[in-house]
Image (cartoon, grey):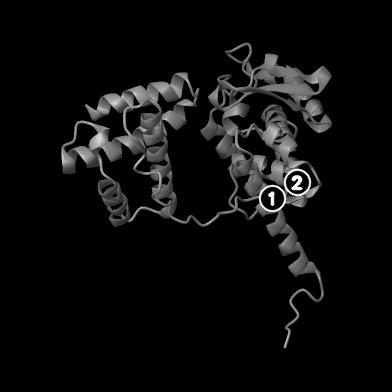
Amino acid sequence: MLENYLKEYLYYLKITKNLAKNTIESYHHDLSDYLSFIDKNYHLTQFNQVTHQQALNYLNHLKRAELSSRSIARKLSAIKSFHHYLVSEKLVDENIFRNISQPKVAVKLPVVLNLDEIDRLLLAAKGDNKILDIRNLAMIELAYGSGLRVSELMNLKISDLHLTNSMVKIVGKGNKERIVPLGENAIISLRKYLVDSRPMIHPEGKDILFVNKNGRKLSRVGFYKIIQTLSQNANIDKPISPHTLRHSFATHLLENGADLRAVQELLGHEDILTTENYTHISKHHLQEAYESAHPRANRKVG
């Protein structure tokens, strides 16, 4: 019986909230675990029967499973949203999880490349200017120059590019479209790729922008491997991934005075609090630069 409520909620997330498939699957996984606990321990058939104490018992169950604070916080967030939905649909009288505090999660700053490391990565991507080198340079220039998510980059179509107008159309999370500016270097690299590289790979699909050496759509894993190789060739010691380019894009914009709301729009963030995380990175980098460069930064006071 409880499973039927979950099915309706997942349908609501898909149709009404228009959430991405991966996000819905994450909700499904976390909520299924919660339902299994309720069913196994209390044999309930209605969510109105779940008590505040049983909610606390589930939280303690998660803690005993030695899950990380971040994992527990994610699960609780999903359950709170689910119970809020049940209240809004008048399926329960109150959200018993509403006043249960989230565990404190340490803010983990994502890895960001400095400008010198970006230059070295681009030089490594240029390589010997062979067919795949031209493709790699176009991908790096576009990913860093416009701050795209990996999935957005891999799903780009040639028809999404508007090089004459220096813009690219992005289909982001929840199939939401946004227009992002293209920098001059990205435009030059993309033009060269479209003329001198992509036709030589013999792509199977006419419109997919980035293809692998066999002409098929390049995968996330394929791009990750490319980034790892280029990072090694550029002698970058940081543990980077394709998403590092997006982090670097946002951080460098904020460090150079870009408006937070503008960066939010460029990144396609629904919540500005997500974008605000990059202000912490920017401040962290400024602190590091100060401590390493200023002659009196580490002066002992006493």
Name the amino acid, label 2: Leu
Question: In the rendered image, which residue does mark 2 sit on?
Answer: 254
| Mark 1 secondary-structure assignment | helix
Q: Position of residue 110 (x, y in %)?
A: 60, 50
Q: Which mark is residue 279?
A: 1
Please indicate whether residue 102 sits to the left or right of residue 58 in the image.
right
| Mark 2 secondary-structure assignment | helix
Please indicate whether residue 226 sits to the left or right of residue 122 in the image.
left
* Depth check, front residue: 220 or 12: 12
Above or below for 202 versus 100: above
Above or below for 299 versus 39: below
Quadrant (top left/top right/bottom left/bottom right) for the C terminus: bottom right
The residue shown at (66%, 34%) is 267
Circles 2 and 1: CB distance less than 8 Å?
A: yes
Quadrant (top left/top right/bottom left/bottom right) for the N terminus: top left
Q: Position of residue 9 (x, y in %)?
A: 37, 26
Name the amino acid, label 1: Thr
